[in-house]
Image (cartoon, rainbow, N blue to C red):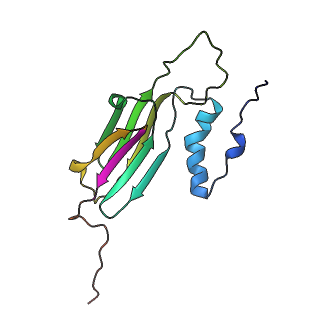
Amino acid sequence: MSLVRYSTANDFVPTSFSNLIDRFFNDSVARSGGSSYAFVPKVDIIENEKAYEISVAVPGISKDDFKVDLNDNLLTVSGERKFSKEKKENNLHVLETQYGNFSRSFSLPENVDAGKIDAKYNNGILEITVPKDEKKTLKTTIKVN
């Protein structure tokens, strides 16, 4: 059996210019090895009528290793995934899991209820629910007199 080095260089297909810029700043340093002690977890953000739901993919981390802060409508999720399973009796052939510190920040709109933000960690996904404040509205219709 021969091992072939896996290359991620060919999977860069941006869907928009914004995606191109995001991938450049979020992925290029980590992929090139320039920052071996940090990584950028993948995030899904869904908006519904009552809340914003942020899902951060960070498997292999204890829920106590997360830090979720809100400061002036900037929600920051940070933590560290530690490399702890070192097996000296076996040869390591591939290590694709990213380890180290991570931090992701999200600018929240003005219409959120900061006192009711909830975070749960389940099956490797940190789920943060940011409820909307029904009293604050970002969209209004102004009647022309």
Q: Which residues are magenta?
A: 125-132
Our reading of the magenta stretch's main secondary structure is: strand
Taking the spot 61% from the left edge, 57% from the top edge, the residue there is 17
Viewer-nearest residue: 40 or 121:
121
Q: Is residue 128 magenta?
A: yes
Determine whether 115 is above or below 111 in the image.
above
Would residue 79 be found to the left or right of residue 38 on screen? left
Residue at far top of view: 89
Would residue 98 be found to the left or right of residue 134 on screen? right
Determine whether 140 is above or below 36 in the image.
below
Determine whether 80 is above or below 69 in the image.
above
Q: Position of residue 21 (x, y in %)?
A: 58, 50
Determine whether 71 is above or below 1 in the image.
below
Residue at far right of view: 2
Q: Position of residue 61 (x, y in %)?
A: 42, 30
Taking the spot 47% from the left edge, 46% from the top edge, the residue there is 43
Question: Is residue 109 visible to the viewer in this orientation of the structure?
Answer: no
Question: Is residue 25 visible to the viewer in this orientation of the structure?
Answer: yes
